[in-house]
Amino acid sequence: MKYIEVKDLTLVLDNNLVLWDVSVKLESGRVYGFLGPSGSGKSVFIKTIFGIFKPVKGTINFENVDKVAIQFQEGGLFDSLNVAENVAFQILKGKKLICELDDELKYQVFNKVLNAARFLNLTDALFKFPEELSGGMKKRAVLGRALIDDPDVLVLDDPVAGLDPINTTSAVKIISSIISRYKPITIIVTHNFRAFWDLFTDICFFEKGRLVYLGLKSEAIKQERVYDFLKCKFR
Ligand SMILES: Nc1ncnc2c1ncn2[C@@H]1O[C@H](COP(=O)(O)OP(=O)(O)O)[C@@H](O)[C@H]1O
Ligand SMILES: [Mg+2]
């Protein structure tokens, strides 16, 4: 069984308590919708469990989790690398560029990149640089990096922010196929929970640095705080 178990996670940034005793067990094959108002701690929680911020208290245990694919809210394509190199970066672990590999390895890596690009409808963009891409293409390139390495954990922080409805629908379809193919532990932070509602199995609802609800999606809407937050957008 693969899981991430977090206990009593507490984080202080600039003298502010931004996470407060957060405990959660995230399991493979489940899709966690991270919801809650802006500034409630969703992004810092993700950054803390993956080592970017150091908590003042709490434990984080990874069980049988090796490969992690994260799409940060800030995006994260390298401007100086083309799409193929950006996607390959995930498997090269930043050690080398594709062009520096020996022929055998280059062939293997490029095949993987090509498979991902076909899956994401990005083959025409493989040799373009980020500045030449549309918003939807950039998001797909980041997804390419996420799926190329058969991830145990897939973390998407605001994956459809700024996309129009058509690109949103196609991104959700792609994300859905990644999930059914690899069955990772999936975390999706989004304000567009309508688009992702069918994919979620569980909801983690954050408010002012606390995890105020964690449980099945079907039970989430029975919780007053969660319902109040969701209802205005479900009408
Ligand atoms: N690098 C940082 N330094 C100091 N405070 C931060 C930093 N990043 C986020 N915060 C604060 O942490 C709180 C939670 O932010 P965040 O996790 O980004 O919210 P969201 O739920 O919208 O993702 C906010 O009060 C934010 O101002
Ligand atoms: Mg955020």
Image (cartoon, helix red, strand yellow):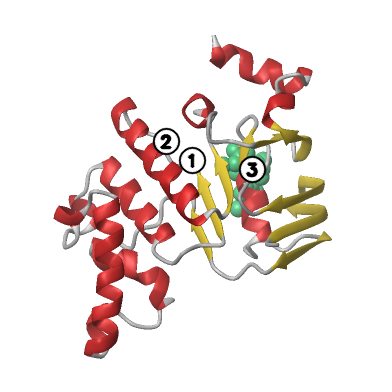
Compared to residue 65, the image places residue 223 above or below, namely above
Q: Is mark 3 within 8 Å of ligand 1?
A: yes
| Residue 26 coordinates in the image, percent (x, y) | 70, 51
Sequence-wise, which precedes: disc 3 or disc 2?
3
Q: Split into 4 quadrants, where in the image is the N terminus?
A: bottom right
| Residue 134 coordinates in the image, percent (x, y) | 23, 43
Q: Residue at x 24, y 64 (%)?
A: 114
The picture quadrant where one finds residue 76 is bottom left
Q: Residue at x 20, y 59 (%)?
A: 129
> Residue tagged by mark 1?
158
The answer to whether one can see residue 133 in this image is yes
Q: Amino acid at mark 1?
A: Asp
Q: Residue at x 29, y 50 (%)?
A: 120
Q: Amino acid at mark 2?
A: Ala
Q: Secondary structure at mark 1?
A: loop
Q: Which mark is residue 42?
A: 3
Compared to residue 101, the image places residue 213 above or below, namely above
**Badge 2 local density, few (<14 within 10 Å), some, or many (20+)?**
some
> Residue tagged by mark 2?
161
The number of numbered badges drawn on the structure is 3
**Badge 3 local density, few (<14 within 10 Å), some, or many (20+)?**
many
